């Protein structure tokens, strides 16, 4: 468990980011258990300024001591601790630094990132004495009129946090009124701080806890603050940023034409303000409106186009980027709508498509093409760089996905004219434009063009003198292979005739600068992927050896570790292996000792620096990932599996060594590779269990790194399928750990569904031996089932999670039912049948299950009938599931659901007839 203070500083580093101070607090040390309790026991309140200053000292010892003192003070008397922090913040005679830190510690005492911690803090605040809370709140409100900007801003954030806790409990009812009364008469800096507070408040609380009258007043105050005649830029900026957060509160106003017109006019005016930050904030509002109020935009879109076009062409980068983002966001909306309804809105679609992009196309495309020419000199070297050219290209790609074929004639002249120009910027922009429009338009439209362009691209990739042009050319080739590979088409782009040339060029480019080499690997990746399931013979077969060799060479380049190059090379190698055919299996087999040797080498060097250790662990991950793909490939067909098994002992030995030398941090990739090995080996894997078991258990215990835990749970499933009842001796340990995980409040929720599925895997493997776990597993399944069944009012994310939970639970039931089939102990399950049926009925009635859940659910109904037979016949007959639900599944268009339902119907009829 974190110590509280450490927690403060941890959060402080993560979120609050005060320039120049991070480094100091970065060094925040773990606090020793031995506290010098005596010194600060008395008079802490008077000392608090000094302690807060000391907590920011450059001297590590002073800092550590101060942190300990703060911690003690808080433990000694929380009310008085928080009171002194708030009065520190409110006191204009104190230094800015102590005030700010005081405020931030106060803020962190109210909110935390982790959910369980956050709930704790909320409860703690609510249980403080009322007079303490009102004193703190009074200090905070007073701070809003401080002449010191940092103090005001800190107070704004703390007030919003308290509002976030109290307003939903109908506490602090006078807050909004008293903020609003600040708005009119007071000096500018108070209005600024008040608007900032209202903005944070809208971010913290949901609109339904504020009554409509107050919502109106907040919006009015905010919009008035944005008025150009306001004169004070700080106020205008605070108001514009507040509006961004308040837009979610403006639903009612956005349905009223006059009020919406007014809000839109004020925002559009603010996009023309002389102050760049205000313009940026105003465009951010437009971006947000483009997704929240898409259906209301028609009357304004023409004006918005003019405003954004001007900003894209003339304004400073942060503003221009937001202006481009507006159109990207409109594309996202229209792509979603068109995907969901396929352009047919006669049905019950919520929001029609207004085809804004299609209408703006003749003006939008030239505007975006211009942005492509604004490249930066070193953009390809700087990972994560973002600039106008990239934003413009991304937007162009989205436009292509939105309108399809219509974009092609608008972009082609630009490409044709500029791709041969002497200026690299023109060549690069033309290539980027081409690469960007490859997803969206139909193959019929693109293929003739690509057929002409391909040769040009290949020669540019070898001959162009400019690094950026080559980078973008390799990327564009990758996009061609990704979207237009066409190995199944009548007239494929890649033919016997040009395949050799393509491969030669790509392999050659892998020796180019690292950014170009990385993109060339990417292109090869999609080239290989296009030949997945091509049949017994792949056109890549003649080049397989050469490709593998070239990729291995890339992984050994001096500069491979600095960029993403090494990772790209291994990802491509994996794809090449994954998509290879039986013809090349002997060559894949030859790769095994090579990769094993590489892995072996990573285990040799001792005494590494922490930086080197991180690099080493990354490399081990890549190598384990590669072995996993090889194991899956060779393990999937009998002849190669047989030969491959000669390496199994050695491979397993390497994996165990990786675990052994990295005892604390488990290795996900090694775990996954072991899962594949178990799956390929079947019963033979049992010989490794004795040694491997302890790492398996460590993985299951590691719920702090929840991905490790989730991956390990999946591997338990693989092992169950491999070992069947030979896994029995390990089941007590595994089940104990899984049950412990489920009872922990700290388990990441995404791990729960796989744990439940894992119950099913275990039960299937050990059959009626699962008996002794029933009394533990069943109640957990039941309570999770109750939770997941009712989702009324949940948002999309919650519904998605509920469905994954339901699926896990259903897989558990299915595994248990099937495991007990034909056993004399079947009757042990009868008491659970009513609840299972009830669960099925209630998810049916909730009407929000996805297809996967539907299939598993109707399967469980069948399992129930199949395993329990006449014992459950009449119960099943009474359930909703056996009628309406079953009928719905029987008429499903999804053949998996239908098949499952037909089987269930048969099982039920047998159960009834007995
Ligand atoms: C904590 O501090 C408050 C305010 O200073 C005081 O009223 C209260 O008695 C203190 N509680 C304890 C347990 O010392
Ligand atoms: C801004 O305020 C001025 C003076 O109060 C008013 O005349 C004007 O109509 C306002 N502008 C907007 C867009 O509301
Ligand atoms: C929002 O709507 C309310 C109620 O119709 C109105 O009083 C308020 O002035 C509107 N606010 C804005 C900014 O249009
Ligand atoms: C080629 O690029 C230039 C900018 O460098 C641009 O002015 C011109 O319009 C482009 N050609 C076409 C046909 O779009």
Image (cartoon, helix red, strand yellow):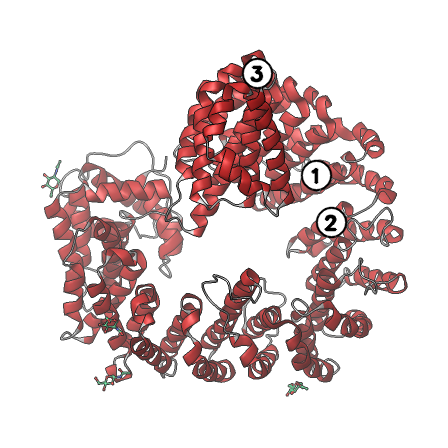
Q: How many marks?
A: 3
- Residue 88: where, in percent of width, then height? 18, 55
Alpha carbon separation for disc pair 1 and 2: 12 Å
Point out which mark residue 575 bears.
2
Name the residue carrying label 3: 768
- Residue 84 visible in this rendered orientation of the protein: yes
Name the residue carrying label 1: 628
Mark nearer the N terminus (1 vs 2): 2
Q: Residue at horizontal 71%, vertical 62%?
A: 483
Identify the secondary structure beneath mark 1: helix
Residue closer to the observer: 516 or 259 = 259
Quadrant where the N terminus is found in the figure: top left
Residue closer to the observer: 567 or 303 = 303
- Residue 31: where, in percent of width, then height? 34, 38
Asked if disc 3 and disc 2 are in contact, CB closer than 8 Å, the reply is no
- Residue 459: where, in percent of width, then height? 81, 72
Mark nearer the N terminus (3 vs 1): 1
Asked if disc 1 and disc 2 are in contact, CB closer than 8 Å, the reply is no
């Amino acid at each position: 468990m974190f110590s509280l203070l450490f927690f403060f500083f941890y959060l402080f580093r993560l979120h609050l980011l005060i320039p120049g101070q991070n480094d100091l607090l970065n060094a925040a040390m773990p606090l020793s258990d031995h506290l010098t309790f005596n010194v600060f026991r008395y008079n802490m309140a008077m000392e608090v300024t000094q302690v807060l200053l000391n907590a920011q000292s450059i001297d590590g010892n002073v800092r550590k001591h101060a942190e300990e003192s703060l911690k003690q003070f808080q433990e000694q008397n929380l009310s008085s601790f928080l009171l002194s922090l708030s009065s520190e913040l409110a006191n204009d005679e104190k230094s800015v630094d102590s005030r700010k830190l005081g405020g931030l510690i106060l803020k962190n005492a109210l909110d935390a990132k982790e959910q369980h911690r956050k709930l704790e803090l909320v409860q703690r605040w609510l249980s403080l004495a009322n007079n303490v809370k009102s004193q703190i709140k009074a200090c905070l409100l007073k701070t809003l009129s401080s002449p010191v900007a940092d103090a005001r801003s800190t107070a704004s954030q703390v007030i919003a946090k308290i509002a976030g806790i109290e307003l939903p409990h109908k506490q602090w009812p006078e807050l909004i009124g008293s903020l609003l009364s600040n708005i009119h008469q007071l000096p500018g800096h108070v209005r600024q701080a008040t608007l900032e507070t209202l903005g944070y408040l809208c971010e913290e609380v949901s609109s339904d806890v504020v009554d409509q009258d107050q919502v109106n007043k907040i919006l009015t105050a905010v919009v008035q603050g944005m008025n150009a005649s306001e004169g004070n830029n700080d106020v205008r900026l605070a108001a514009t940023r507040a509006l961004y957060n308040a837009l979610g509160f403006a639903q009612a106003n956005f349905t009223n034409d006059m009020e919406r017109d007014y809000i839109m006019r004020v925002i559009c005016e603010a996009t023309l303000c002389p102050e760049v930050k205000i313009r940026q904030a105003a465009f951010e509002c437009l971006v947000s409106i483009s997704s929240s109020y898409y259906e209301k935009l028609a009357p304004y879109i023409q004006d918005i186009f003019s405003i954004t076009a001007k900003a894209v062409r003339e304004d400073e980068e942060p503003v221009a980027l937001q202006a481009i983002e507006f159109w990207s966001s409109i594309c996202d909306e229209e792509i979603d709508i068109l995907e969901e309804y396929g352009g047919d809105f006669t049905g019950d679609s919520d929001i029609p498509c207004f085809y804004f992009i299609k209408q703006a196309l003749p003006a939008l495309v030239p505007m975006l093409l211009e942005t492509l020419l604004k490249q930066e000199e070193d953009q390809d070297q700087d990972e994560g760089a973002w600039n106008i050219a990239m934003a413009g290209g991304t937007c162009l790609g989205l436009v292509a996905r939105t309108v399809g074929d219509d974009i092609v004639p608008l972009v082609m002249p630009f490409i044709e004219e500029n791709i041969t120009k002497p200026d690299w910027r023109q060549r690069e922009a033309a290539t980027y434009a081409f690469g960007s429009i490859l997803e969206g338009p139909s193959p019929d439209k693109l293929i003739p063009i690509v057929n002409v362009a391909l040769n040009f691209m290949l020669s540019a990739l070898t001959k162009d003198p400019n690094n950026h042009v080559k980078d973008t050319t390799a990327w564009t080739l990758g996009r061609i292979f990704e979207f237009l590979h066409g190995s199944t088409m009548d007239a494929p782009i890649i033919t016997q005739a040009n395949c050799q040339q393509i491969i030669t060029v790509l392999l050659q480019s892998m020796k180019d600068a690292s950014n170009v080499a990385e993109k060339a690997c990417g292109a090869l990746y999609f080239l290989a992927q296009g030949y997945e399931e091509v049949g017994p013979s792949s056109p890549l077969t003649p080049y397989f050896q050469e490709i593998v060799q070239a990729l291995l060479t890339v992984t050994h380049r001096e500069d491979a570790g600095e960029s993403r190059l090494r990772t790209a090379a291994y990802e491509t190698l994996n794809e090449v292996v994954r998509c290879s055919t039986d013809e090349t299996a002997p060559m894949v087999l030859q790769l095994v000792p090579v990769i094993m040797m590489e892995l072996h080498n990573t285990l040799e060097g001792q005494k590494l620096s922490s930086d080197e250790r991180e690099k080493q662990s990354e490399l081990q991950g890549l190598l384990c990932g590669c072995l996993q793909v090889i194991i899956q490939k060779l393990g999937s067909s009998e002849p190669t599996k047989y030969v491959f098994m000669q390496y199994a002992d050695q491979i397993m030995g390497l994996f165990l060594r990786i675990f052994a030398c990295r005892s604390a941090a488990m290795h996900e990739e090694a775990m996954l590779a072991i899962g594949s090995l178990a799956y390929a080996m079947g019963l033979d894997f049992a010989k490794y269990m004795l040694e491997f078991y302890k790492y398996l258990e460590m993985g299951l215990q590691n719920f702090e790194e929840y991905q490790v835990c989730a991956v390990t749970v999946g591997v338990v499933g693989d092992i169950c399928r491999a070992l069947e009842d030979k896994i029995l001796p390990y089941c007590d340990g595994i089940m104990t750990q899984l049950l412990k995980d489920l009872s922990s409040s700290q388990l990441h929720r995404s791990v729960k569904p796989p744990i439940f599925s894992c119950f099913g895997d275990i039960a299937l493997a050990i059959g009626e031996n699962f008996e002794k776990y029933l009394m533990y597993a069943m109640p957990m399944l039941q309570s999770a089932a109750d939770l997941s069944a009712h989702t009324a009012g949940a948002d999309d994310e919650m519904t998605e999670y509920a469905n994954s939970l339901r699926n896990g639970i259903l897989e558990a039931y299915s595994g248990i039912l099937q495991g007990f089939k034909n056993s004399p102990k079947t009757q042990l399950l009868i008491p659970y049948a009513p609840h299972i049926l009830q669960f099925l009925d209630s998810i049916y009635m909730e009407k929000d299950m996805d297809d996967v859940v539907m299939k598993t659910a109707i399967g469980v109904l069948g399992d129930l009938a199949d395993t329990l037979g006449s014992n459950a016949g009449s119960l099943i007959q009474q359930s909703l599931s056996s009628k309406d639900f079953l009928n719905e599944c029987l008429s499903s268009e999804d053949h998996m659901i239908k098949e499952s339902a037909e089987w269930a119907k048969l099982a039920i009829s047998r159960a009834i007839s007995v």
